[in-house]
Amino acid sequence: MNGADILVMILVAALVAAAVLLMIRNKRKGKRGCGCDCSKCGGCNFHNNDRKEQRKM
């Protein structure tokens, strides 16, 4: 392998690591994965209602 191949591999690994760290940080802050407010998303509202019912129990 030459220097360019190694540089590309390091760059790809850094991008993957940054994406994973961003997902972990957003998860800890309670943010959604899609980046929207999910107020109009049928799937998100469905899951939110399930969570609210579980908390009441």
Image (tube, grey):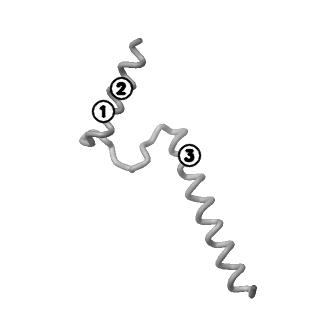
CA separation, marks 1 and 3? Answer: 24 Å
CB-based contact (under 8 Å), mark 2 and mark 1: yes
Tell me where residue 57 sits by quadrant: top left
CA separation, marks 3 and 2? Answer: 24 Å
Please identify, in this view, whether the residue under mark 3 or under mark 2 is nearer the observer. Answer: 2
Q: Which mark is residue 22?
A: none
Total of numbered circles in the picture? Answer: 3
Helix, strand or loop status at disc 2: helix
Q: Residue 42 at what x, y percent from top left?
A: 26, 39
Q: Residue 6 at what x, y percent from top left?
A: 72, 79
Helix, strand or loop status at disc 1: helix
User: Which residue does the image show at 35% across and 30% down from the upper left?
Assistant: 48
- The earlier-in-sequence mark between 3 and 2 is 3
Q: Which mark is residue 50?
A: 2
User: Which residue does the image show at 69% across and 85% down from the upper left?
Assistant: 4
User: Which residue does the image show at 36% across and 26% down from the upper left?
Assistant: 50
Mark 1 lies on residue: 46
Work out whether 17 lies above or below 50: below
Mark 3 lies on residue: 25
| Amino acid at dot 1 | Phe
**Label 3 CA crowd tier, 10 Å (few <14, some 14–19, many 20+):** few
| Amino acid at dot 3 | Arg
**Label 1 CA crowd tier, 10 Å (few <14, some 14–19, many 20+):** few
CA separation, marks 2 and 1? Answer: 6 Å
Helix, strand or loop status at disc 3: helix
